[in-house]
Each structure stands twice: as C-alpha cells, then as structure tokens.
Image (cartoon, rainbow, N blue to C red):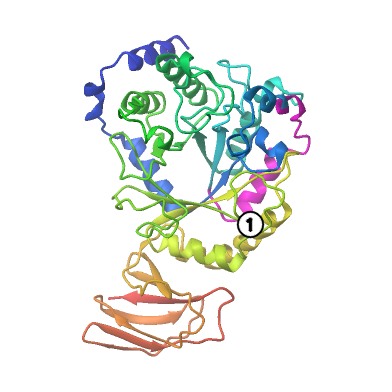
C-alpha cells in the first residue's frame, strides 16, 4: 500500500508536459489489446441506486432531484436477489467474453466498499461489496473484467460545476479540482489494487465541461499514467467522442458502429486501436420500468455482425433491477444470442474487418484466408460485387456443399439460397 501511495503522490505532482507524449504500451498491454479485439462481444452493466427509482441512470439530473433527498435511496438499497455467479453464467452463456461494470456513475454512488467516501454500497442495508462478488465470479467463469468510472459527479462539492448537476444542491463556490482529482485517483488506486486483474478502465467522456469558456484541464495524462503504473496490462478507453488521445488503448463509439454516425455521437475518425461500440438492448442504460422497447434477437445479432465487420467489439448493455435480478427479457435475448454464437461464433470471434461489403445488406469478417460473408438483407437473391481478392471456393457456412460462382475481372457473383439462416445467411469464402 505504501508503494501505491507514493506512486499516487508522484503522478499528482507530475508536470503535464512530461506525461503527454511519453506513453509506450507494455508487451502485456499490447497482448491485452489483442485479446480484447478477439473477444468481439461484451456485456455492459449499468447498476446503482438509480435503479430503485426505475427511471434510468439520469433520473437525478433529469428531474432536478436534490442530492440529499436522492441519497436517501441508499438506505433502501438491498439487492437481496443479486447472485454474481448467476450473472456470470448468464453472460457466459450469451457468448460474451467480458463484462464492463459501472463502479461509480454520475450520481457519485460507489458500488464497492471504497475507503474514500461513505456514499457506497457497504453503507447500505445490503452491506456487502457488489464489485468484489462480481470480480470473483468473473474470474471463476473466465470472463475479463472492465470497470466503468465516471469523471463527473452531481453530488460532490469539490467537483467543479459543469453543464449538469446544477439543480442538485451542489455549492459551486466550494469547487476544488485538486481535491476531486486526488479523490478520483485514490478510488482508481483501490479499483486497481483490491480486485485482481482489471483488463480495462472505461471512462465516460468529458462532455460536462465542453462548453466552458476556458478549456477545462482534466489532467488525464497523469491519471492514465497512474492506471498503467498500477496495472501495466490494463487498457484505458474514454468515451469522449473524439479520436483517441495519448495514453488511451482502445477507441469507443457510442450507439454507432465505427465509421457511422446515425445517433449523432460518433462522428470521429476511426483509429488503428482496438474498437468498441456500446449500445443499449432497449432504450435506456439504467433500469427504467416502462422501457420495454427491446431490440429483437434478430436486430441484436445483426448489430453484432455489423460491428464485427467493422473490426470492432459490441458492448451490449443490461440495466439490472433494484433487487439484483437481470430483466427477464434481457436474459431471454442473451440466451438467444448465445445460441446463435455457438453455431456461428467462428465468423465473429478472432476475426477482423472483411473487405467485401455493400453497406447494409452484405458485410464480411475475415480470419486468415477465409472470408465470412453475412447477407443481412432478406430481399437479396444474389451477390454481385467487386472483389479484389482471388477466390478459391465458396460454401454455405456449416455445409460441405460448394456454391457455384463466377469470378471475372475482379467481380464476384453467385446466387443466394433464401431458405437458409434464421437471422442471416452466411457464406464461407476461401481465398487463394
């Protein structure tokens, strides 16, 4: 612990210029990047005392709830049905290979027994450390653990007032960035020393101060350096909707596959780092009782396929209920995705972006000299597209039967079998 305290003190006093251009990933970090990229599918979990209100994770901000009144919910938070091993088993059966868990969201409540604040799960009637249980369950199930951590706080006075949290009773005149920065780094030190190997830290952007007249200095280089010093293999990602900055190890796209910007949040250019798309299963991230607008399994599978075809992971969100159960519909969707992946996972796991695509209807992934062509549009009866690679043979995926095709002047064409495939039709193309 003394070593970690000295490291924290060194990082806090380190000049910005020293760390800004000095990041060199360790071999262990690079290996984790490769493992992360090969996984292709993870589960995002948004869970905190906001689940008690059943109005989503932004309830405090959206309804202008006073922080002291909101905090009373902690006295009623008793997730008696929470079973970390059951969660891990459900996630494992879905075909996902890692979990990203919200350790502290914008409401400032910590889901572990932090020593930095009394506003945490151990001070509720439940008393037990949620994160500790989940971390141990993930290890038993072979799931990699990623930890979400918000830079923004709607409750602490020392966090400088941003564009949100203005109606919670915070006292803007008590802002003290040095105090808050030290608090965050002390919490991050706990997360990276008390819970075993953490494969990634997932930050949620800096949008709260993007409208400041004077650019806000989040002092991220020093914070990133602290993370990499505590666990050199740990990856850092930041959902800031920009191209990655110094010290970041993967790039995040919110509600869009890389290279698209349908939701208006992911217009940044695509980097060469590992990529991840985060998306909700229904409409909200945190539990909202009236939000039953779940995407169908067909839609979710196609989202996974389209994401993998961009060379990216899909981080699919689940918002647990306040009692600790995962919503029944979410569990059903995950089970059905797992069924699809057990049959077709070779076309997703360990692949990279394929060269054949027409946008929405046809996409592809690649593994070595094998292309997996996913036909997503039901109305298509044939493939006729430019193909710069020489083709050796084509088969319907999972079949030994060869498909007749024409390859001439760098153009590939063949007829599609419209009777096969519950969610899409997959063809295995062997290249010369």
- From the viewer's side, name the closer residue of 78 and 348: 78
Q: Position of residue 400 (x, y in %)?
A: 48, 82
Residue 391 to residue 39: above or below: below
Note whether residue 84 is visible.
yes
The residue that appears at 42% across and 50% down in the rendered structure is 276
Q: Secondary structure at mark 1?
A: helix
Q: Is residue 105 left or right of residue 354?
A: right
Q: Position of residue 217 (x, y in %)?
A: 33, 26
Residues packed near mark 1 inside 10 Å, few (<14), some (14 to 19) or many (20 plus): many
- From the viewer's side, name the closer residue of 48 and 234: 48
- Which of the 4 quarters of the picture holds residue 332? bottom right
Residue 374 to residue 183: above or below: below
The residue that appears at 60% across and 27% down in the rendered structure is 109
Q: Is residue 232 left or right of residue 303?
A: left
Please report the bounds of the magenta region as a residue range.
Answer: 73-97
Residue 217 to residue 1: above or below: below
On whether residue 207 falls in the magenta region, the answer is no
On whether residue 79 falls in the magenta region, the answer is yes
Residue corresponding to mark 1: 334
């Amino acid at each position: 612990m003394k070593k970690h305290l000295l490291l924290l003190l060194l990082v806090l006093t380190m000049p910005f210029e020293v760390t800004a251009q000095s990041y060199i990933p360790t071999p262990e970090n690079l290996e984790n990047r490769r493992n992360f990229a090969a996984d292709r599918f993870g589960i995002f979990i948004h869970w905190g005392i906001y689940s008690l209100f059943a109005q989503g994770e932004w309830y405090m901000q959206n309804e202008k709830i006073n922080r002291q009144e909101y905090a009373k919910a902690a006295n009623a938070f008793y997730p008696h049905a929470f079973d970390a091993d059951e969660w891990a088993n459900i996630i494992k059966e879905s075909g996902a290979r890692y979990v990203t868990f919200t350790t502290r969201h914008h409401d400032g409540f910590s889901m572990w027994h932090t020593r930095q604040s009394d506003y945490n799960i151990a001070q509720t009637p439940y008393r037990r450390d949620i994160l500790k249980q989940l971390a141990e369950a993930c290890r038993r199930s072979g799931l990699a653990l990623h930890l979400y951590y918000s830079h923004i706080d709607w409750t602490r006075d020392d966090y400088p007032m941003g564009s949100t949290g203005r109606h919670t009773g915070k006292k803007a005149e008590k802002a003290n960035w040095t105090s808050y920065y030290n608090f965050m780094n002390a919490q991050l030190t706990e997360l990276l020393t008390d819970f075993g190997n953490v494969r990634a830290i997932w930050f949620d952007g800096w949008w709260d101060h993007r409208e400041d007249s004077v650019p806000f200095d989040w002092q991220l280089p020093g914070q990133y350096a602290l993370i990499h010093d505590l666990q050199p293999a740990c990856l850092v990602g930041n959902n800031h909707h920009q191209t990655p900055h110094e010290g970041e190890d993967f790039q995040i796209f919110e509600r869009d596959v890389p290279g698209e910007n349908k939701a208006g949040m992911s217009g940044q250019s695509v980097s060469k780092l590992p990529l991840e798309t985060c998306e909700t299963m229904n409409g909200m991230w945190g539990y909202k009782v009236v939000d039953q607008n779940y995407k169908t399994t067909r839609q979710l599978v196609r989202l996974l396929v389209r994401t993998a075809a961009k060379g990216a992971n899909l981080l699919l969100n689940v918002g647990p209920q306040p009692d600790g159960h995962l919503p029944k519909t979410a569990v059903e969707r995950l089970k059905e995705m797992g069924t699809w992946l057990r049959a077709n996972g070779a076309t997703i796991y360990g692949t990279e972006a394929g060269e054949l695509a027409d946008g929405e209807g046809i996409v592809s992934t690649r593994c070595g000299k094998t292309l997996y062509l996913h036909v997503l549009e039901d109305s298509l009866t044939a493939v006729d597209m430019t193909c710069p690679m020489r083709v050796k043979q084509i088969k319907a995926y999972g079949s030994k039967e060869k498909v007749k095709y024409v390859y001439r002047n760098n153009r590939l064409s063949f007829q599609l079998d419209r009777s096969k495939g519950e969610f899409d039709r997959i063809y295995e193309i062997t290249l010369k």
